[in-house]
Image: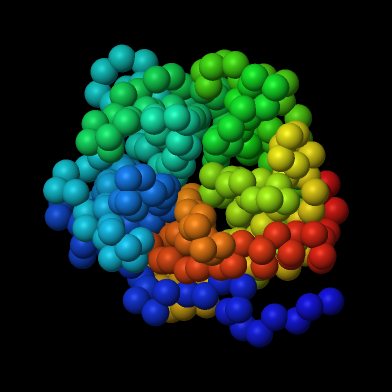
Amino acid sequence: MTIYPKDLIVRRFEGNPILTKDHVPYPVVTVHNAAAVKTRGEYILVFRSHLRNGRSILGLARSKDGCNFTVDPAPFMVPAREGVFAEYEEFGIEDPRICQIDNDFFITYSAYSRHGVRIGLGKTSDFRSVERVALITQADCRNVVIFPGKFQGRFARLDRPHTEIAPWSIWISFSPDLVHWGDSQVIMKPAPYHWDQMKVGPGATPFRTSEGWLHIYHGVFQTMDGAVYRLGVALHDLEDPAKILGVADEWILQPEDPWEVTGYVHNVVFTCGAIPEDDGTVKIYWGGADTVMCMGTAVIDDLVGLCLSVPRPPT
Ligand code: BMA
């Protein structure tokens, strides 16, 4: 078994946290759980912020280097005020993910209302305005990440339904058009007496490597001091993403910095976005304690190696 020195897998950026509420030119109390994408030389984060009423909206920040971000003057998305979306976004919108398909960027986000939580699908081509496409789950489902590719003519997504009789697990579903989804099956479950034993959920949008689709997910462990959110990695088959080639036994990131250990919710690192670079590294973005945004880099081959050389069973 390989023993990695502290922080060798994910190297935290020395300028963390990269975004806080002080960077936001409108009133918010948190900046966290950002989707991330790189397009035309620009890094974009679509982040979640709590308002002072406890409900969330989405803001947008831009950067030339992936580390130093400037927040747009106005929020990117606020809960819809009319139509079907208004009814299902009444309590706020949270935890976005971005998937690029051709020249369009599809944003999945959690829509909260008195009916539960379901997932909305938005679409933008320029990150200036966003069009709502559809609500793509029933209640109660969260953490939808869409693969940026097609599999035998169909799109694929990972998601995480809630159920009372089994620990919350990662499922996969397929769609011809991004709106209608089916053929659902569970593919990854928490491992008993393991760092992710309480629940697992999709994290960053998966990205292609030579060995498979790399998915950075979150896992939760319940302690006497509350839940601890950490990040792990799983590798999915390139042709059939329902097939998991390996899930790393060890987490790749846990709350350690003061702004990850203490905040709006203690002991949380939670990712909604990672950007693979041409030099073989990946920039991973995560929310710290549901309060700030942080960034770190990892070598993609190291993450793939963890999945394949020290795996735990996926289910
Ligand atoms: C999850 C989601 C995330 C949050 C995490 C830790 O259930 O609500 O948005 O970051 O809990 O509080």
Give how far across and how far down residue 284 sits, in percent: 49, 60
Q: 221 or 132, which lies in front?
A: 132
Quarter in which the N terminus is drawn: bottom right
Give how far across and how far down residue 137 sits, in percent: 55, 24
Taking 233 as reference, is 37 left or right?
Answer: left
Quadrant assignment, res 64: bottom left
Q: Is residue 23 visible?
A: yes
Taking 289 as reference, is 306 left or right?
Answer: right
| Whether residue 159 is situated above or below residue 298 in the rendered picture | above
Give how far across and how far down residue 58 sits, in percent: 31, 43
Q: 39 or 227, which lies in front?
A: 39
Quadrant assignment, res 134: top left
| Whether residue 223 is situated above or below residue 88 in the rendered picture | below
Give how far across and how far down residue 181 sits, in percent: 61, 20
How many marks are shown on the rendered structure? Answer: 0
Which residue occupies 76% across, 55% down? 247
| Whether residue 266 is situated above or below residue 119 in the rendered picture | below
Q: Residue furthest bottom?
A: 5
| Whether residue 186 is situated above or below residue 132 in the rendered picture | below
Which residue occupies 24% across, 31% down? 129
Taking 89 as reference, is 246 left or right?
Answer: right
Q: Is residue 264 visible?
A: no
